[in-house]
Amino acid sequence: MNKLEQELSKPINLAISRASNNVNSMKTVAVFGRETHVAEMFNKKQQPDIKEHRQAVSWNSLIFGLSQTVVLFVCGLLFWYGGYQLADGSVAVAELFSTFEAAMTRREPLGAALNTPHSSSMVERQLPEMMKLALKGTEIEFMNVNLEYSNRKEQLAIENLNLRIPAGQRVAFCTLLSRFYEPCRGAILIDGEDVRSVTPDEHLDKIALVSQDAVLREGTIRFNLVLGLSRKVSDQEIIDVCRDAQVMEFVTTPELGLDPPNDTKGSNLSGGQKQRLCIARALLRDAQILQLDESTSALDNKSEALCSTSFRSRIHQPDYNYDYVNVSLVFE
């Protein structure tokens, strides 16, 4: 029974783990416009588990039904035998009911004792574990923008902000520009177009984000690098961005490489390595708006300087398509 319960809990635990992974990487998935793809992957991975879970539930239901049948049969047998003894005069009414009362009072501690192995096994298992926006590359504009957070509606986080950002400028409104928050007043314009006049997918398709929290999904390093791309990329393009992001030193090792599985979401990588992979992913995206939200916080001084040089050289290449670069500042 205990083994069956463990088998029954496996697909549930896997589903919870996958759902948790999707929720934790929600911001990255949204920026790269992969919500539909991630949902399809989740459903696809769940199908074998659902089938296995149904089989386990069927067996568990059968065993539960049989056990309850036995219990009720024994109770009925006892009542029949007690009634027979009472009718025969072998026992008195008070003696009969005191016997049943004693049996019932001992049922609860007996049930608790039988559940102890189940509870301990649970502890053991938990221990290890609209319209398209054509960007012309001119400017971004915040026009009379107010922002309030849902848990602090009485106080505006931003009030009456007016800001114009020419191509190549560095500013700090990553969450507003990515539309993770919507202004409660005013508008954000890109080349004169209100970002709310286009679908979120169309808007986010023009954005590449490198956040402070480096988020990698289950899969190979190559899968994480091409996440959200609508075009096919060559191995040479991947190698070029890996070189610019200073990740060649570990993606070319036999232990990692581009294609061996990395199903633990980068747990075998350091924080700096994961952040450099996210930088390479943003460079490979070749988006028109590049957002860097404390993107080098986990890098050492040497790696940060090399990555900054790579960003600047790519932005100023004539055939490269970055128009805006956003870095992090703090606005109270």
Image (cartoon, grey):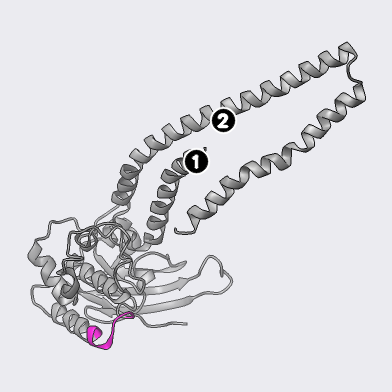
Q: Which mark is residue 64?
A: 2
Query: Which circle's residue, 2 or 1, is located before the other in the chain?
Result: 1
Q: Is residue 144 above or below residue 221?
A: below
Q: Is residue 30 magenta?
A: no
- Is disc 2 placed on a helix, strand or loop? helix
**Image-based side of 58 in relation to 261, left or right:** right
**Crowding at label 1, few (<14), some or many (≥20) Cα neighbours within 10 Å?**
some
Q: Is residue 303 magenta?
A: yes
Q: Residue furthest front?
A: 90
Q: How many marks?
A: 2
Give coordinates of residue 44: x percent, y percent: 31, 42
**Is 173 left, or right, of 148 in this rendering?**
left
Which element carries disc 1, helix, strand or loop? helix
Residue denoted by label 1: 5
Q: Which residues are magenta?
A: 297-304
Q: Quadrant of residue 50?
A: top left
Mark 2: which amino acid? Answer: Phe
Rendering coords of residue 243 (x, y %): 14, 75
- 31 left or right of 229 in image: right
Q: Which residue is depicted at the point 16% across and 71% down?
A: 242
Among the 4 quarters of the image, the one containing residue 187: bottom left
Q: Position of residue 248 (x, y in %)?
A: 15, 73
Which label sits on residue 225? none
Residue 191 appears anywhere in the view: no
Corner quadrant of residue 118: top right
Mark 2–mark 1 distance (CA, rounded to whole Å): 12 Å
Front residue of this view, candidates 41 and 124:
124
